[in-house]
């Protein structure tokens, strides 16, 4: 476990005491943030994070804080394995999920600076990618488009399906892991190096990231955070034999903090490249843009670079204000990890966060989530009929904002996932009764009936959904399949 270091300017970073995160009663006064020393604020993190993990049902978390190009605080909380109870620490290895992308992007930018790759040349010039030969627009796709998520690719193609280009390359933002795979193949062809060897040479070794790899390292087993589902159950752990630039990085909070320090200072990059990496290249949303391989956020505190990670059983987030010299990164090994995103931001950097708003993850203390949790427990313990009775009672007693079509829809899909098809149909039927003018509940009910083998009712509900929303392409596809099978 890392030794705590206290830095005078860490006050800039730790701006709040987590009244909300700890779910303190309003009558329980906490010390005013203005009267706390930096050391006291770090101690506050020590007791508020466990309370937050408990409130969000998050298994484990590892966090590192950077100030003045130094890792000033790094700690682990919770467990690597809910069954064994092995604790997380600052050197526990996690899947970084999409935090893999900015690390690979940095490697590509180093190659661009050395003349190995031209960011604006067609990638097909470097690699003849079989997956995109069918679309003539593939010759327009460049490394810059990949790094700014403007390729036109989906995030991931359907399993076993064809990779498509969904809009004119370069015309707008659409997040894509597929683009990074294409760029990875091109770079590997150019350099003749395997993915892991390439990034180790350009990133891990120069920056001292000794516990980071895109391929599996058996040495990680001794201090590894295993993935957990929303109910705290252990999930299968992938151990990648081949590196994936978009998603397979394994690392630690302290290693990734070293990467943040390098990026904020432009280490290893030409000045113009370092500036471009952290400058808006393409607009995403209000206050949110994308640089070269990493997100850009603008708020009252200035410009920050950020990214998030979301693999099954692993969630991560990082945010750095380069002008202030402060940054933060955390990794979790829980499907619930992003439910504490906004509380962690409030408790560390504070302020507004357009990027987190854009991601729009449901937060652990959201009224809808709390009501859904009550309903899920009753479904498991007493059955669907009791849950429907409870739903009607809760509508009378709980805040109105806790209830929308998404509440019942998510319950229904949870039941479908667990192959409780009849129960799911009952929930979806309730949803269309509650929200008769919303198209999505009918679409979901149609899907449930289709899974149940009731084609007639499936068609009726898909048709109703399409009447309410003629742009519902999912209903069009489902109806074609259902009618073709008649």
Image (spheres, rainbow, N blue to C red):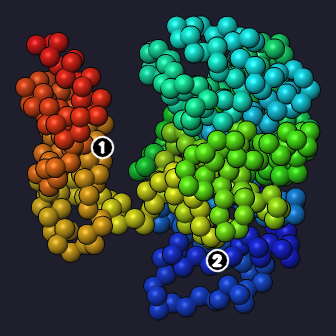
Residue 459 lies, in percent from the top left, at 12, 27
Task: State the residue in front, 287 or 95.
Answer: 287
Residue at figure coordinates x 65%, y 89% from the top left: 32
Task: State the residue in front, 229 or 144.
Answer: 144
Residue bearing mark 1: 414
* Label 1 SS: helix
Residue 94 lies, in percent from the top left, at 66, 43
Residue 121 lies, in percent from the top left, at 75, 19
The label on residue 16 is: 2
Choose the circle earlier in sequence order: 2 or 1.
Answer: 2
Mark 2 and mark 1: Cα distance apart in space:
36 Å
Residue 227 lies, in percent from the top left, at 54, 42
Q: Residues within 10 Å of mark 1 (few under 14, many from 20)?
A: some
Quadrant for residue 485, please give it: top left
Residue at figure coordinates x 9%, y 31% from the top left: 460
- Whether residue 43 is visible, yes or no, is no
- Whether residue 467 is visible, yes or no, is yes
Q: How crowded is mark 2: few (under 14 residues within 10 Å), some or many (20 or more)?
A: many
Question: Would residue 204 appear left or right of 470 to someone viewing this image?
Answer: right
In this rendering, the answer to whether 189 lies above or below 34 is above
The label on residue 158 is: none
């Amino acid at each position: 476990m890392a030794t705590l270091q206290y830095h005078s300017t860490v006050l800039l970073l730790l701006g709040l005491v987590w009244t909300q995160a700890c779910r303190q009663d309003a009558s329980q006064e906490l010390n005013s943030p203005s009267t706390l020393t930096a050391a006291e604020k770090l101690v506050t993190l020590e007791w508020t994070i466990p309370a937050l993990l408990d409130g969000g049902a998050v298994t484990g978390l590892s966090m590192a804080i950077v100030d003045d190009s130094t890792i000033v605080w790094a700690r682990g909380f919770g467990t690597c394995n809910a069954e064994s109870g092995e604790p997380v620490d600052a050197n526990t290895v996690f899947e970084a999920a999409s935090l893999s992308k900015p690390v690979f992007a940095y490697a590509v930018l180093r190659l661009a600076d050395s003349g190995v790759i031209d960011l604006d040349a067609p990638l097909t010039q470097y690699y003849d990618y079989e997956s995109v030969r069918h679309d003539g627009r593939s010759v327009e796709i460049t490394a810059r488009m990949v790094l700014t998520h403007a390729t036109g690719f989906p995030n991931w193609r359907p399993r076993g399906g064809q990779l498509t280009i969904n809009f004119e390359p370069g015309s707008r933002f659409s997040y894509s892991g597929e683009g990074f795979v294409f760029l990875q193949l091109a770079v590997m062809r150019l350099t003749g190096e395997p993915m892991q060897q390439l990034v180790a040479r350009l990133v891990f070794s120069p920056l001292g990231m000794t516990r980071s790899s895109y391929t599996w390292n058996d040495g990680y087993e001794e201090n590894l955070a295993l993935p957990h589902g929303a109910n705290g159950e252990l999930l299968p752990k992938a151990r990648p034999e081949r590196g994936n630039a978009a998603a397979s990085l394994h690392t630690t909070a302290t290693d990734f903090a070293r990467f943040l320090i390098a990026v904020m200072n432009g280490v290893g990059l030409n000045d113009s490249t370092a500036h471009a990496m952290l400058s808006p290249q393409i607009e995403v949303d209000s206050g949110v843009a994308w640089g070269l391989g990493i997100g850009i956020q603008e708020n009252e505190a200035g410009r920050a670079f950020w990214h998030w990670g979301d693999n099954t059983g692993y969630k991560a987030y990082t945010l750095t204000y380069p002008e202030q010299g402060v940054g933060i990164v955390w990794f979790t090994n829980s499907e619930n990890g992003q439910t504490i995103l906004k509380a962690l931001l409030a408790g560390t950097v504070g302020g507004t966060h357009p990027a987190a708003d854009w991601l729009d993850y449901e937060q652990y203390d959201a009224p809808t989530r709390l009501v859904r949790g009550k309903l899920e427990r009753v479904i498991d313990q007493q059955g669907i009929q009791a849950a429907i009775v409870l739903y009607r009672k809760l509508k009378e007693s709980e805040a109105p904002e806790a209830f929308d079509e998404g509440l019942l829809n998510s319950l229904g899909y949870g039941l479908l996932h667990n192959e409780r098809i009849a129960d799911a149909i009952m929930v979806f039927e309730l949803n269309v009764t509650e929200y008769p003018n919303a198209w999505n509940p009918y679409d979901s009910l149609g899907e449930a009936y289709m899974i149940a083998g009731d084609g007639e009712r499936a068609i009726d509900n898909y048709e109703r959904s399409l009447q309410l929303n003629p742009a519902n392409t999912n209903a069009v596809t489902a109806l074609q399949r259902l009618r073709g099978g008649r």
